[in-house]
Image (cartoon, rainbow, N blue to C red):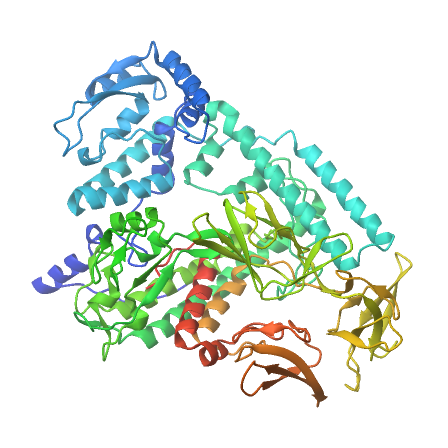
Amino acid sequence: DGDQMAVHVPLSFEAQLEARVLMLASNNVLLPSNGRPVAAPTQDMVIGSYYLTNPPLKVKDLEAVSSDSERAKKARQAADKELDKLFAKAIRFSSFGEAEMALSTGKVSFHSVCWFWAPVMVGQEGTGGKWIRTTAGRILFNSIVPRELGFLNKTFGKKELGDLVFDCFTVAGLSRCTDFLDDLKDFGFRYATLGGISVGIEDLEVPLEKADILHEAAEQVGRFQRAYASGYISNGERYNKVIDTWTHANNDVADAMVRHLERSKDGFNPVFMMMTSGARGNRDQMRQLAGMRGLMAKPQKKLTGGIGEIIESPIKSNFREGLTVVEYFISTHGARKGLADTALKTADAGYLTRRLVDVSQDVVVNNDDCGTIMGLEMTALKEGEDIIEQLGDRIVGSVTLEDVYDPIDGELLIEAGELIEPEVAGAIEDAGIQSVKIRSVLTCESRRGLCRQCYGRNLATMKTVDTGEAVGILAAQSIGEPGTQLTLRTFHIGGTAARIVAQTQRKSKIDGTVALDRVTTVLTPKKEKIVTSREGQIVLMTKDGQVRSRLSVPYGATLSVDESQEIAAGDLLFSWDPYTEPIVADSVGVIKFIDIVDETTMREELDESTGRRQMTITEDREKKLHPMLQIVSKTKKREKLREFIVPVGAQLTVRDGEDVTPGDTIAKINREVYKTKDITGGLPRVAELFEARRPKDPAVITEIDGNVSFGDIKRGKREVVVTPDTGPGRTYEVQVGKHMRVHEGDQVRAGDRLSEGPINPHDILRIKGPRAVQEYLLNEIQEVYRLQGVKINDK
């Protein structure tokens, strides 16, 4: 593209020396952003190593069973016996040289099973060697591995090779590691060539189950179409269900395909090896080649997640079978969009890096210890039940703020002010400690810049950071550099709409007891418990009373557990409909419409295809009427029991004067449900978080704890009053059409949202203080990168 650049030639001796120290490849083995090796084998080198160390299927299966501690002892012993049979007549080698000779004379092949007399590890000279079951290829591979690491008897893909380089760096040191990297490169290329791995169209085996899966999905879609035709579900619900069905079908075909390829050619199917080893391609691309191409996005400017953004009929063919003309036409849009996005976004990513460097350039490590008593309390990062990042991974390389004791026997694990090494981090996790206080860059009290204790370890050198290190610029570049990866992401999926399949239920992952925090429920006549709180949480505790996880329970969910009930792993906790948010009646009574007037604030839409009438709330043009549903008592007095504000776009499921019982759904609001995984949201999202912009129409947040009541409506805004138990109440104004998260009489805590919408970081700062806003921004930014599988250290 015609770019020009200047070339700098280091002339003087000092300049050459400096360039060598700072820029030589062998001095830059680790990534400063997350401490993983920067120089790890890729592509051909990976496939060569993988091909050589991959055992035949039979051995692989038996190895998996005999080393699986979850299996029954009998199964493990049976697998061991089978392995003994396989290896009974196997040849025995006592040195690398013997194995190489046997291979060169053709006596054994790369994948022949054999025994190897494993050499003694460095540092364990006293112990004797032992016979190891292995394959000839693995013996070859180990001939280049540093002696300090011992004999490695496993299959090496990209991830394992990366770990191996890292271990080599920590155990054998830098110079040995750089030599090993060179050997690994030559070795990988050599055996990728000798293996003769190539791709033919026959290698893409289309799974036999594909036809059945597609047939079943099509039938299901037909059922939804009929349900819509007879008026049981709305068009929006039908669309969401159809898309969901195809997403599931797509995943099933992909699973079937992977199962087939795993078994094909005795586990040496070239295309499958390329994917599993991490040399090239991923599951998604494999699926498009041999499974089905899947759902595509419609041509349009912006993805918001509304109805009709994904074309309902998926591309059922794959690239091996070939696409039909129509399918090909749909495909072209996705491909073109990918290419256009790529060109446009590269500039944005560069600009983000420049702005980050601009703000952080004077953050430099300039003293040993600022002496602060502040710090961050680190816990494992969880999303609901699932642990995204373990506690150990988050604290390693930081300095402790307080002594850490083992909760069971009170033993001191690490003193305050010590650097947490990986071994200690492991010990802390094994002890079952839930949170550790560490020194953090966010709490450093140096007048200018940072201190060494608060920063901890420099990830690029694995030692405590040096004074004078420009950590601000290092951080800016570490965040900006993956920005280009973020932007180019849409291109890889090739416009296929990747949808996160919405969950409909939550099960427990542990055995323990349940505590309900701020969860309120009503009992339906069928004895189901329907949740009527919005900020409620289920707290799962282990038998000894440690809090394991907190799960937010959505409004309108059906709860399956009671307070302090004992549960086992896999028990259902609650289930909900991810596509619609209900408004639930919580008492017996009669419905009374307030300000719901036909043709003004309510449209009765006759659904042509169904012949049923659907009542949808619309906005009053003159802004005088404000639709509400009241539940009044069945007595003569008809006193008001409960009042619900109905937002614009809600669909009513009851008529005026109808009787209701607790737990009945009286209105439904469609949720903007699915997140389309397209990083177009990603890069701008990171930028807006760093600039702490006010999102457009943010949620209204309460600043105090208290009870909610609704006031009058003035100038198109509704007053929401929060009254605490003591002291004066606060009044907030909410736009009338906005969807409320609270109803009359609900209990709220400071920081809870009163209306739907994105959170404004300035509100968090004002209400919960700087600590909370720092944590919020950190987690939100990490969230964007994590979706893309990019690792950046929290520093």
Give the x, y percent position of residue 761: 48, 76
185 relative position to 694: left or right: left
779 relative position to 287: left or right: left
The quadrant of the rendering that contains the C terminus is bottom left
Which residue is at 43% across, 19% downward? 79
Quarter holding residue 304: bottom right
179 relative position to 644: left or right: left
Q: How many labels does the image show?
A: 0
Quarter holding residue 702: bottom right
* Front-lying residue, 655 or 120: 655
* Front-lying residue, 344 or 360: 360
Which residue is at 57% across, 30% downward? 205
Quick one: which residue is furthest to the bottom in this view? 715
* Front-lying residue, 140 or 154: 154
Which residue is at 64% across, 71% downward? 741
Which residue is at 67% across, 64% downward? 532
Give the x, y percent position of residue 534: 62, 66
Is any part of residue 565 visible from this angle?
A: yes
212 relative position to 155: left or right: right
Give the x, y percent position of residue 139: 27, 25
> Quick check: 748 above or below 611?
below
> Quick check: 17 above or below 226?
below
> Quick check: 413 above or below 57?
below
